[in-house]
């Protein structure tokens, strides 16, 4: 069972892909939840501008999603003590995207083709944050390895604040082979690595681009790094010498988005 909790993650899942939500659990002692449940004509059932909790119920009614009223103790148990804000949702088992389909979609985007390849990201919170950034900044999807890497877990879904059920993640057996396939399709690979010889802005990302981010501790594996077209180093001016993987990925994604906006001016 994949469970997300908190107002924003649940709302985003219900707004973007209600079919992925099997059930919503709401705190029975919430005034907004009781009001939304009892309001059958929908006049105060909650849309944007009303309370977030009543909007949850309105979206459940529209999408035919079952709502179960539970105690706050039950919600605390479901969320393992996390901040649930009176609501949680159970998601259907995640479907990973087919790599070939994802690659074709990115290729069809032409110069706006943008994919993120993650090498050994083991922290599901980093995976979720990277997927949210990739979705927000124009990427068509994320590629992860099948071994020694975090997958789409409840923790990753929670960290994505609801973005993961709406975003494409493909799992592959061999990341190096996958990169080379994408390069044969016209993608240029850009790796974030401390050995990089240039800053991100020195690489043209207005063509189909594959951004590569390494693991939290070891970075990008040597064989994969050797196949990358460009290696970029994010300039650091303070005493800290490295960045969290999700932060480094967000910086590269933001630079790609900036360059593409500039191209369109």
Image (cartoon, rainbow, N blue to C red):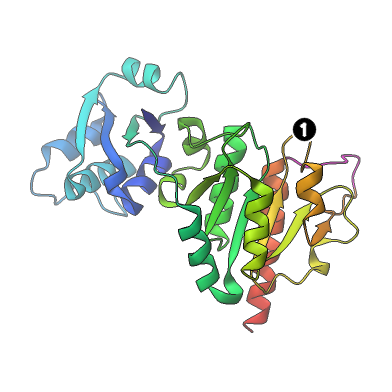
**Quarter of the image containing the C terminus?**
bottom right
**Quarter of the image containing the N terminus?**
top left
**Nearer to the camera, 32 or 219:** 219
Residue under the image location 34 percent in, 15 percent down: 73
Residue hosting label 1: 217
Q: Is residue 163 visible?
A: yes
Residue 77 shown left or right of residue 140 in the figure: left
Tell me where residue 12 appears, x and y as whole percent: 39, 48
The question of residue 243 being in magenta is answered with yes
Residue under the image location 56 percent in, 76 percent down: 110
The question of residue 217 being in magenta is answered with no
* Vertical comparison of 249 with 125: above or below: below
User: In the image, which residues are magenta?
Assistant: 238-244
Tell me where residue 260 appears, x and y as whole percent: 65, 74
Tell me where residue 59 appears, x and y as whole percent: 24, 48
Tell me where residue 253 appears, x and y as whole percent: 66, 59
* Vertical comparison of 81 with 196: above or below: above
* Vertical comparison of 135 with 36: above or below: below
Q: Is residue 28 visible?
A: no
Residue 45 shown left or right of residue 97 in the figure: left
Residue 94 shown left or right of residue 178 in the figure: left
* Vertical comparison of 108 with 56: above or below: below
**Nearer to the camera, 65 or 228:** 228
């Amino acid at each position: 069972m994949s469970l997300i909790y908190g107002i924003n993650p649940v709302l985003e899942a219900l707004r973007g892909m209600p079919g992925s939500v099997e059930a919503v659990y709401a705190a029975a002692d919430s005034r907004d939840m009781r009001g939304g449940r009892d309001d059958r004509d929908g006049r105060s059932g909650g849309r944007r501008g009303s309370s977030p909790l009543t909007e949850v119920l309105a979206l459940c009614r529209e999408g035919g999603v079952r709502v179960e009223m539970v105690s706050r103790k039950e919600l605390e148990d479901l969320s393992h003590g996390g901040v649930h804000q009176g609501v949680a949702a159970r998601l259907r088992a995640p479907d990973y995207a087919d790599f070939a389909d994802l690659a074709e979609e990115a290729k069809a985007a032409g110069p706006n083709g943008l994919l993120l390849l993650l090498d050994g990201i083991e922290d599901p919170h980093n995976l979720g944050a990277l997927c949210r950034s990739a979705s927000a900044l124009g990427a068509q999807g994320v590629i992860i390895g099948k071994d020694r890497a975090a997958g789409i877990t409840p923790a990753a879904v929670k960290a994505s604040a609801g973005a993961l059920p709406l975003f494409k993640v493909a799992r592959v057996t061999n990341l190096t082979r996958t990169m080379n396939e994408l390069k044969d399709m016209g993608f240029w690979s850009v790796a974030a690595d401390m050995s990089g010889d240039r800053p991100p802005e020195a690489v043209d990302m207005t063509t189909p681009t594959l951004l590569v981010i390494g693991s939290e501790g070891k970075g990008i594996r040597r064989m994969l790094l050797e196949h990358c077209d460009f290696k970029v180093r994010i300039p650091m001016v303070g005493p800290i010498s490295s960045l969290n993987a999700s932060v480094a990925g967000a910086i590269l994604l933001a630079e790609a988005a900036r360059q593409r906006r500039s191209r369109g001016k």
